[in-house]
Image (cartoon, grey):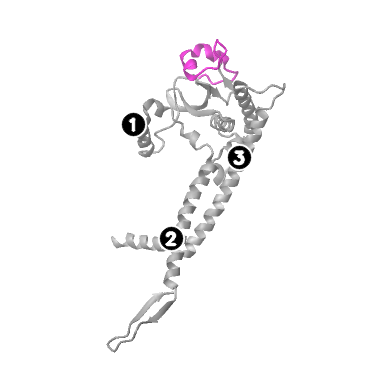
Amino acid sequence: MKAKPRIWLRALKNALTNLYTLFFLNGFLLCLIVYTYLEDQYEQETFHSLQAYVLKSFNGKPVNEDTAFARGMHLVYGLETMHRQVFSAAAVGGFIANDIHPVSYDFTTGQGACGSSSLVLGRLLLSMHYTVRFAHMEVDGQPGGHHILEVKLRDRWVVADPLYDLYFVRPDGRMATFSDVRDNWARYKQQAPPGYDMRYSYAALTHTNWKKIPLITPAVKGILNLVIGKERADAVSLRTIFLRKFHFLFIVLAVAWAIVFSVTARRLWQQRRRRAPMQVIYGPYTASQPSVHLVHA
């Protein structure tokens, strides 16, 4: 019974080192690399177009940082509201939408509600060189009930809710942080638009769900706590890292192709050496034993 796994492993190894299999894998991976590159470029160009609209000057003056941020959120709110209405009749499915789920899908359909709006605004602001992080708001004592965005404007993390086209303004005219709103929700909730769900009361938030993958993500969080400290680790937003999914897949596939290509090249070299013709070289003849040498050509 113990020999069966070894047989399967040997068969798998032989299949993966077979030149025909390796040639197929090289071609397949190259096709995927080209596809993910083109998808990433399409997504890049889409958000560059949105960026150009946001930064367009309507009075001949350059758009400052705060205005560009506010314009970006107004644009995302308007587009996502319209897209959500259009695609509300039937959900868009398929492998790309369900399994890869790029930001271009969220932009097109808006079917993820607060999650989609936050991802689209975050992607737009990243293309405009803002620093952003995603946050999961606690609702009715449960974590992850509502998705919002934090944007770094100068030295402060301003809170934004693109689902409601909402950011808060302090009495001094500056945009409010999460702690500003949390510590005085009774005042700031007056700035919420009609239809706002008052359960989203800014009681608490997390930036990453470290319990999502048992054992793995808690272990990563533990390592981060030791390396950079718990306070900084709590502010790490993994969603920001994987925001450009096609770009991430492009890098992963490129590394995989480099490994497969190196294995293929090594197998070709080994096969060439095995098939090299042999030359017979006769040395000086002696009565006892002729000297014959076999060497590779």
Question: Residue extending furthest bottom?
Answer: 287
Residue pictured at 55% horizontal, 40% vertical: 102
The earlier-in-sequence mark between 2 and 3 is: 2
What residue would you read off at disc 2?
Answer: 16
Front tag of 3 and 1 = 1
Q: Amino acid at mark 2?
A: Leu
Residue 174 at x, y percent in the picture:
56, 15
Q: Amino acid at mark 1?
A: Leu
Residue pictured at 59% horizontal, 44% vertical: 39
Q: CA distance from mark 2 to mark 3?
A: 34 Å
Residue 151 drawn above or below residue 263: above
Residue 148 at x, y percent in the picture:
52, 26
What residue would you read off at disc 3?
Answer: 43
Q: Dot 3 surroundings within 10 Å: few (below 14), some, or many (20 or more)?
A: many
Relative placement, left or right, of 261 versus 195 is left
Q: Amino acid at mark 3?
A: Glu
- Between 57 and 70, the residue placed more toward the observer is 57
Residue 3 at x, y percent in the picture:
30, 62
Residue 160 drawn above or below residue 17: above
Residue 194 drawn in magenta: yes
Mark 3 and mark 1 in contact? Answer it, CB < 8 Å: no
Q: Dot 1 surroundings within 10 Å: few (below 14), some, or many (20 or more)?
A: few
The earlier-in-sequence mark between 1 and 2 is: 2
Q: Which residues are magenta?
A: 169-198
Residue 253 drawn above or below residue 273: above
Q: CA distance from mark 3 to mark 1?
A: 36 Å
Residue pictured at 56% horizontal, 45% vertical: 96
